[in-house]
């Protein structure tokens, strides 16, 4: 069973290396993904250019669940809260939850005018953070609004009260967790697993794009409006971009602290293993993998047929080995490894961060195919993506690879298909309760 390794050439989001080998199929993939994005953006385009509204996009995936991954993400550090507590929070009043950001002049009465305007609309202010910027202040609200109040009208109310650069984004009950508790939860996740840093940054900073790239960022990092750069403890730099919404010094300081924590702790990969029973009484184990598994992964490649490697990597079979170091890096995603009773690596499943989206990729050694290993790996990867707040998971494969398409269908999730010159991109939407049961 096969899938694609990475979908863009020269872009370090998957490889983090200037010398990443070329992918001859990247143009086809780009065209397919561009068509899917264009269709989605047409459905979700804001109607008023002067009021930037993220609510329309959020209707497809309620909550701040975006990222290259905004938030807190669904299934993030608040997952441990009792279900009844979250349910009570969501039922606290009729209407919708919104996270709203507006810039006001730093002068007496400016915040009072904004709050008064919200009160006239029947809006309940549940939380407020302020980000001082000299003669201006960025106020970030968590609001409960009447169901009849549309995000455009909400943004216009704030603008009439003196707010500028108004942005609205759909929130959910998880956003009711106070900021210190949320940041501590993110720090805990980062401390336990190197792969959590990109997701933690996305959760902390909201709807944004995060990528690891070659570069030489100073230790103190840089902050430039809608972009910030941080030194990547794994090498190179971490680039965070958030169109239309400038980062504040407070947000930059929090992000820098998470990166420093990651650097102090070094590489960390959970070593928990699960037994998986296969037909005919055979069993294997499933665990997380990282660069330490490179030698075993290369040995598995050597046992795979050219057809299996070709379906997986869509390029010259001789280039397959050169992808592995990048794919196994926890900075670019998470990898699951399947081991036989003899200790041989027989399958790999990759979950790769790709902007707002997430790619799932599978490779199962020929002798172990058609035993349910690929389906189990994909289910676990999808669960990881859901727990990480991702809105969708996509797989790229050849149109002739009916096995991979069938495996995606086996998730039981809403699917979108994009076909371009023999390449198929199958995207599964991760609705809050739609992840296939264990």
Image (tube, rainbow, N blue to C red):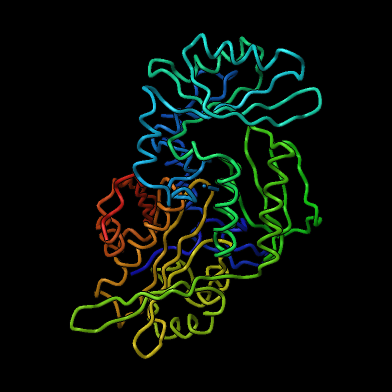
Tell me which residue sits at (44%, 63%) in the image.
Answer: 4
Q: Quadrant of residue 58?
A: top left
Q: Quadrant of the N terminus?
A: bottom left
Q: Quadrant of residue 59?
A: top left
Residue 35 x/y as whole percent = 44, 41
Asked whether 136 or 3 is in front, the reply is 136
Tell me which residue sits at (20%, 84%) in the image.
Answer: 281
- Image: 74 above or below 331: above
From this viewpoint, which residue is outermost toward the left? 280
The image shows a total of numbered marks equal to 0
Is residue 280 toward the left or the right of residue 275 in the image? Answer: left
Residue 23 x/y as whole percent = 53, 63
- Image: 100 above or below 20: above
Residue 136 x/y as whole percent = 76, 23
Is residue 69 toward the left or the right of residue 229 in the image? Answer: left
- Image: 215 above or below 171: below
Q: Quadrant of the C terminus?
A: bottom left
Q: Quadrant of residue 282?
A: bottom left
Asked whether 363 or 158 is in front, the reply is 158
- Image: 82 above or below 119: below
Residue 91 x/y as whole percent = 35, 30
Tell me which residue sits at (68%, 60%) in the image.
Answer: 261
Asked whether 105 or 19 is in front, the reply is 105
Tell me which residue sits at (39%, 64%) in the image.
Answer: 3
Is residue 238 toward the left or the right of residue 273 in the image? Answer: right
Asked whether 247 or 359 is in front, the reply is 247
């Amino acid at each position: 069973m096969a899938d694609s390794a990475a979908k863009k050439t020269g872009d370090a989001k998957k490889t983090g290396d200037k010398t990443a080998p070329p992918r001859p199929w990247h143009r086809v993939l780009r065209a397919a993904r561009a068509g899917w994005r264009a269709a989605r953006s047409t459905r979700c385009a804001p109607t008023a250019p002067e009021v930037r509204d993220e609510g329309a996009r959020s209707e497809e995936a309620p909550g701040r669940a975006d990222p290259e991954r905004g938030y807190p993400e669904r299934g993030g550090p608040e997952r441990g809260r009792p279900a009844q507590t979250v349910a009570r929070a969501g039922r606290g009043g009729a209407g919708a939850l919104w996270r709203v950001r507006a810039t006001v002049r730093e002068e007496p009465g400016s915040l009072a005018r904004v709050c008064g305007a919200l009160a006239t609309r029947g809006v309940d202010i549940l939380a407020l953070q302020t980000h001082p910027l000299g003669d201006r202040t960025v106020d970030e609200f968590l609001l409960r609004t009447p169901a009849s109040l549309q995000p455009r009208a909400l943004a216009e109310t704030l603008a009439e009260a003196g707010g500028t650069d108004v942005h609205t984004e759909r929130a959910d009950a998880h956003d009711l967790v106070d900021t210190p508790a949320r940041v501590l939860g993110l720090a805990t996740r980062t401390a336990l697993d190197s792969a959590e840093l990109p997701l933690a940054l996305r959760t902390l900073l909201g709807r944004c794009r995060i990528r690891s790239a070659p570069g030489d960022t100073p230790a103190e990092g840089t902050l430039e409006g809608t972009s910030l750069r941080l030194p990547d403890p794994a090498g190179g730099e971490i680039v965070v971009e958030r169109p239309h919404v400038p980062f504040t010094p407070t947000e930059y300081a929090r992000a820098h602290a998470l990166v420093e924590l990651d650097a102090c702790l070094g590489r960390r990969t959970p070593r928990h293993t699960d037994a998986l029973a296969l037909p005919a009484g055979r069993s294997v184990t499933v665990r997380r993998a990282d660069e330490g598994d490179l030698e075993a992964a290369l040995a598995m490649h050597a046992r795979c047929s050219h057809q299996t490697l070709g379906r997986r990597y869509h390029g010259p079979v001789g280039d397959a080995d050169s992808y592995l170091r990048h794919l196994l890096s926890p900075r670019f995603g998470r990898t699951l490894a399947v081991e036989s009773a003899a200790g041989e690596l027989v399958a790999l499943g990759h979950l790769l961060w790709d902007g707002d989206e997430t790619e799932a990729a599978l490779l199962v050694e020929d002798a172990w195919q058609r035993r349910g290993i690929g389906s189990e790996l994909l289910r676990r990867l999808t669960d990881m993506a859901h727990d990480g707040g991702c809105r969708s998971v996509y797989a790229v494969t050849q149109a002739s690879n009916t096995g991979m398409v069938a495996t995606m269908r086996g998730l039981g999730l809403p699917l979108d298909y994009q076909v371009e010159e023999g390449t198929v991109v199958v995207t599964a939407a991760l609705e809050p309760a739609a992840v296939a049961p264990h």
